[in-house]
Amino acid sequence: MNNWMPFLKSDPTVAVIRLSGVIGGQPRAALNDTTLGPVIEKAFRKGKPDAVALEISSPGGSPVQSSLIGSRIRRLADEKKIPVIAFVEDVAASGGYWLAAAADEIYADPSSVVGSIGVISASFGVHEFIEKNGIERRVYTAGKSKSMLDPFRPENPEDVARLKELLEDIHVNFKDHITTRRGAKLVKDRDLFTGEIWLAKRATDLGLIDGIGHIGPKMKERFGDKVRYRRYGARRGLLSRIGASVIDDAVMGIEERAAYARFGL
């Protein structure tokens, strides 16, 4: 009824965006800007919510997708003048913490894992295996760096040096984002950018988050008992829902399980 009577005050509304899973550029990844973009846009633009809450449980992933998603959230928050509050569940690490830092405030459960402000690249080497089994690797390139870090060839120190330079540059971008978003809240007497992780209480002391809290009590504390929620999240495609991509889902499940396992989850 209130929608038809603008002179009556509506109950406060919070748009809730769920950000759960590994961040990746592939269309089938749990979190990416292509899939989440329309979801985030709708959450900010439908009506005018009093706040947008982010429910985050992510061990990280692609730095580019983390930046794209976080930038979209900030752009809309500034445009619509809507406060954004993040609530960490199991973990907001690496790219997951990048997303959390896009919010104006961050809260977490006492056992939530937070941090891992660093960059990692992992691969494998099987050149000895293929040599022992009489397999010949044939690669032809134009450009000496085109086959950099080929796992089927012995590791080249020059390739490793170039990779480390790239990782350092991405790390600088990550640190710039966190210092810009958290600013004076961060403690000054400790290096927070080593890739270390902390539980929520310690993360609060370090200024990485604003405190301990869950979405229900915090939103009632801020907006009263009559606060309402509109929930938004990425939907899986029809083929995925009916099991047409079982193998892909299984592989992604293993990769996601491995990503969470790094934080004991």
Image (spheres, rainbow, N blue to C red):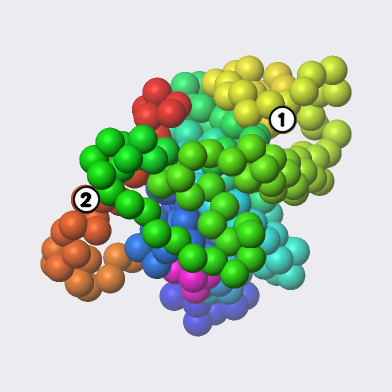
Place of residue 219 in the rendered image (x, y in percent of width and height, measured from the top left): 55, 43
Q: Going 21% across and 50% down the picture, which residue do you hit?
A: 250
Secondary structure of the magenta portion, mostly?
Answer: helix
Residue 191 found in image quarter = top right
Q: Disc 2 residue type?
A: Ala
| Image quarter hosting the C terminus | top left
Location of residue 45 (image quadrant): bottom right
Left or right of 225, for residue 178? right
| Residue identified by numbered label 1 | 193
Q: Earlier in the sequence, mark 1 or mark 2?
A: 1
Q: CA distance from mark 1 to mark 2?
A: 33 Å
Q: Secondary structure at mark 1?
A: loop
Q: Which residues are magenta?
A: 34-39
- The picture places residue 114, in percent across and down from the top left corner, at 57, 30
Instruction: Judge left or right: residue 194 versus residue 219.
Output: right
Residue 145 visible to the viewer: yes
Instruction: Please identify the quarter of the rendering in which residue 230 is found.
Output: bottom left
Quarter of the image with the N terminus is bottom left
Residue 199 image point, x, y percent:
55, 21
- Point out the residue furthest to the bottom here: 4
Residue at left offset 36%, top offset 35%: 128
Instruction: Depth check: give the residue in front, 144 or 73.
Output: 144
Decide: is 259 above or below 14.
above
Q: Nearer the viewer, residue 198 or 53?
A: 198
Q: Amino acid type of disc 1?
A: Phe
**Mark 2 residue crowding within 10 angstroms, few (<14) / some (14–19) / many (20+):** few
**Above or below — where is 230 with respect to 90?**
below
In the rendered image, which residue does mark 2 sit on?
250
